[in-house]
Amino acid sequence: MIERVSDSGEYDNNKNKINRRDFLKFAGAIGIGIISAPLVGSMSRFTPIYYNHPASSNSQSQGQNNNDNNGLVRTAEATTTSSNDKNGFRYVQPVPSFKLTYSNETWTFTKNFRSDGSMRCDFKDRIRNSVFIGGYFKVKGPDSEEVSAKLNGGPHTSSSPENTYADTMDVGITNFLGTKSRVRWEKTHPNYSSSIAPSSSYLPVGDVRNKWRGYCGLKVNLDDNRDGKPDRVALIGMVDVGGLNSTTMKPVNNWKVTYRRIFTPSEIALKSIWRPYVATIDKPELAQTSLRVDEQSQSEWQSSNPPYKYVTCKQVTATKI
Ligand SMILES: [Ca+2]
């Protein structure tokens, strides 16, 4: 049923009866549902048409910079035209046997930069059951400090009962020395489980301090048997060891997996596996996805030339291939 086309672009555009404009009209007509599971199969024969056309994707990006609230347009672009987002940030594909589709992107986040040195980029705009969060940072500090992604969770609040809303999958993407990664469960704030090692990684990735490096974390629900219900969860951490091009300041996109492990539900010591717990208790507005790095300078992060760039959060959909 699903027609697969190689990523190398072995596809003859001239044989296709629809062009890009038709596709976008079609996408508009059916809305963001184009990325929902039942339609992925029927859509897949259209999507390869727009792979490997960076020139058209660049022009598409123009004028969409103010469309942060328009998930529809971004969905069409993210799923059909580009391997990178509007800032050149790669739509990474780190999950073996699954194709990830990106949608509902935003670059608007709460700058939760604290005087104690804890810098947190908090996204609270919507529920994303499978989620990507990433950014470029220039960090400094001790070997053991880390860049972490807080996924599938709620608020990190100590008062009761809100402390039980955290229910967070915490991916330590890498320590500053570039040698370690980990996952911890934060069922109740601020109580973390012991660290869970990756099942695979490309560590070490080199010292990440005092240079621009890209970081991302993903939590992806995986439907192994294609019955429409998720079976396992992939938790991923990655570092762009190329960082930013020193001339263009654009991402180099030399991404290395620092953490990869696929979990069964029984391995996850949280109240909610497939979606943020707060969404299951009718408090979806409390859902939160964050990138965090501690022991940084608050004044630098609040300055006009801060040590962060291109911070973004995106919805992810995984399709078995
Ligand atoms: Ca399933």
Image (cartoon, grey):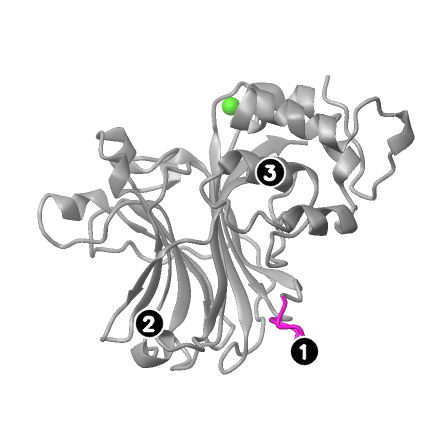
Residue 34 on the magenta span: no
Q: Depth-wise, is mark 1 or mark 2 nearer the camera?
A: 1
Residue count near mark 2 (Cα–Cα under 10 Å), binned few <14, some 14–19, many ≥20: many
Residue count near mark 3 (Cα–Cα under 10 Å), binned few <14, some 14–19, many ≥20: many
Which of the two residues, 63 or 245, is positioned nearer the viewer here?
Answer: 63
Q: Residue at x 64, y 71 (%)?
A: 242
Q: Is residue 105 left or right of residue 245?
A: left
Q: Secondary structure at mark 3?
A: strand
Q: Which mark is residue 157?
A: none
Sequence-first tag of 2 and 3? 3
Residue 244 on the magenta span: yes
Q: Which residue is mark 3?
A: 101
Instruction: Tell which residue pokes out farthest to the front in this image.
Output: 63
Q: Is residue 13 above or below residue 235?
A: above
Note whether ligand 1 is within 8 Å of mark 3: no
User: In the image, residue 92 lies at what x, y percent?
Assistant: 62, 51
The quadrant in which the C terminus is found is top right
